Amino acid sequence: MRRELAKEILANWNLPDVFFLTGDLGFMALEEVKSTLGTRFVNTGVAEQNMVGIAAGLAREGHKVFAYSIAPFCYARPFEQIRNDICMANLPICLIGNGGGYAYGAMGPTHHALEDCAAMSALGMRVLVPAFNEDLGPMLSSFTAPTYLRLGYDDRPPKTAAPAYAPWRQLLTGSRGVLTALGPLGGVAWGALQDLPEESRPSVWVASELCTQLIPADFYDQLSENHPLYVIEEHVAAGGLAMHLAYAISQNKLPCGPLRHHYALGYPSGRYGSQSFHRAECGLDAIGIRQMILAEL
């Protein structure tokens, strides 16, 4: 999605009050952004804490700021600066973490972002997890507060059009419960279940924002005590999509069947590999999702 991000910045954010910072990353994606923004594109070097401090200083001077890095370097390394410099002052800064979940594969756990949504949500940031390339435009149409954007890969089925953006969207109809996936895993679930008869599958939803206030009534209306609620996310169980959703259901005293939760298990085999390898180990690939659903039939 980083190339789509670059297109969005060039199309709509080449403005006098916008700065784009990078922690010495973005090769083969951000070159045109650099040449177009000129002095408003700043390579801060491999110094993420300093990058966040610079972003905060620019925002205090009235600018809107994008700050880009590999996801764990974006949220984990400068966590204190994000908390103190950005969130406490409620500054209009969008932190862009590229490669959410296991996206950096064999580079190992130092390059994986498995608890980022929980960490940034805990600080009160708006957490955005686009499912499809087309989501970036409407997501970034305006931001006025601390925001975390988690980039991944668009994994929709081939030759399918992405539905119009909404924080929560239905991708498939179904009559055997509800499945909701975080960001790009929505596309994986869509592909895994689209050929199952409607009476043999759950409805499939994708969530792209963790804010429970944005969950539509249509989603709640499909919950039933007679069928499971499935949640899949390339994120640890704590503080992720399932916990936010379970809290919302509890607060609203809604009927709901058993929760079937597939999430990032870390490294069950003690080995590191591609994103596909790690997803398969956690039951987050198309095969694992399909087996989860068929096991209920």
Image (cartoon, helix red, strand yellow):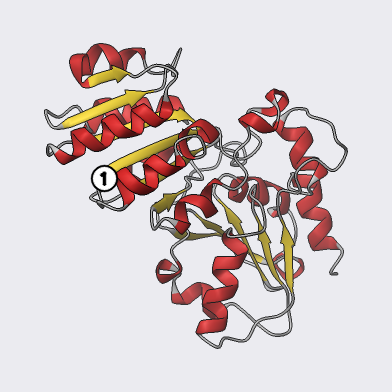
Towards the viewer: 274 or 173: 274
Q: What residue type is labelled 1?
A: Ser
Residue 276 is left or right of residue 53, and the answer is right
User: Residue 164, can we see it?
Assistant: no
Seen in the picture, residue 124 relative to 269 is either above or below; the reply is below
Q: Please give the name of the residue rendered at 66% of the width and 36% of the height, measured from the top-left corner.
A: 102
Towards the viewer: 166 or 20: 20
Q: How crowded is mark 1: few (under 14 residues within 10 Å), some or many (20 or more)?
A: few
Q: Please give the name of the residue rendered at 19% of the width and 33% of the height, measured from the top-left corner.
A: 58
Q: Where is residue 136 in the image (x, y as percent from the top left)?
A: 38, 40
Q: Please give the name of the residue rendered at 49% of the width and 43% of the height, measured from the top-left corner.
A: 161
Q: Where is residue 79 in the image (x, y as percent from the top left)?
A: 46, 42
Residue 88 is left or right of residue 49, and the answer is left
Q: Please give the name of the residue rendered at 69% of the width and 33% of the height, measured from the top-left corner.
A: 109
Q: Quadrant of the C terminus?
A: bottom right
Towards the viewer: 114 or 14: 114
Say which residue label 1 marks: 141
